[in-house]
Image (cartoon, helix red, strand yellow):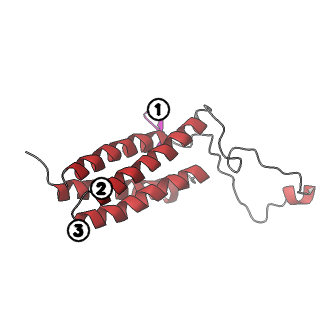
Amino acid sequence: MTLSRRYLTLAAGAASAATLLGAFYVQYVLGFLPCHLCLLQRWPHAVLIVLAALAFAVPGRLLPLAAAATALVGAGIALYHSGVERKFWAGPTDCTGGQNLSGLSGADLLDFSTPSPIIRCDEVGLQVLGLSLANINLILCLGLVWLWIAIARRG
């Protein structure tokens, strides 16, 4: 039994929607604040939901190929974040402790009236079966690349 293009498109869009809902659940229900790279990983899934809706309605290969490319970008961001978490390479200075504090006075450093927690990108906040959420997103995005290519092949 072969699955129809429309069914696969719906499944791919639902996977990205579930990923975003899961990220919001982890943030707002479980209380794990996202770092800068975590937030960046959400954008490809938002784009994939829109592309899935369009590809569901419009036949052809262009939209599924665009979605495959978008999922590949998502995999790239997740791979980068995974490497930062595992200390394979340096991450962005705004979330890995490389901030320049030289322009701040002692009073500025001790002013806690407006708390703004720095969520570090190089620390794993939550693990599932030994995998960080960035690792899980990498696997998911690679699966979505494969799925969108399969959808494109169906025309």
Give the number of the disc on residue 26: none
Label 1: few (<14), some or many (≥20) within 10 Å? few
Give the number of the disc on residue 57: 3
Instruction: Give the magenta part as a residue range.
Output: 127-133
Q: Which of marks 2 and 3 is nearer the N terminus?
A: 3
Q: Quadrant of the N terminus?
A: top left
Question: Measured from the top left, where is residue 112 in percent x and y?
Answer: 79, 60
Q: Is mark 3 on a helix, strand or loop?
A: helix
The residue identified by callout 1 is: 130
Question: Measured from the top left, where is residue 104 in percent x and y?
Answer: 88, 57
Q: Which quadrant would residue 49 be assigned to in this image?
A: bottom left
Q: Are marks 2 and 3 in contact (CB under 8 Å)?
A: no
Is residue 12 shown left or right of residue 111?
left
Question: Measured from the top left, where is residue 30 in percent x and y?
Answer: 50, 53
* Measured Cα–Cα span from mark 1 to mark 3: 39 Å
Q: Which quadrant would residue 64 be assigned to in this image?
A: bottom left
The residue identified by callout 2 is: 64
Is residue 51 shown left or right of residue 57?
right
Is residue 19 shown left or right of residue 76?
left
Q: Which residue is drawn at 73% across and 61% down?
A: 115
Q: Is mark 1 on a helix, strand or loop?
A: loop
Q: Earlier in the sequence, mark 1 or mark 3?
A: 3
Q: Earlier in the sequence, mark 1 or mark 2?
A: 2
Label 2: few (<14), some or many (≥20) within 10 Å? many
Q: Which residue is drawn at 24% across and 67% down?
A: 58
* Measured Cα–Cα span from mark 2 to mark 3: 12 Å
- Given residues 74 and 25, the one toward you in this image is 74
* Measured Cα–Cα span from mark 1 to mark 2: 32 Å
> Which amino acid does the dot numbered 3 rest on?
Ala
> Which amino acid does the dot numbered 2 rest on?
Pro
Q: Which residue is drawn at 57% across and 50% down?
A: 37
Visible residue check, residue 110? no
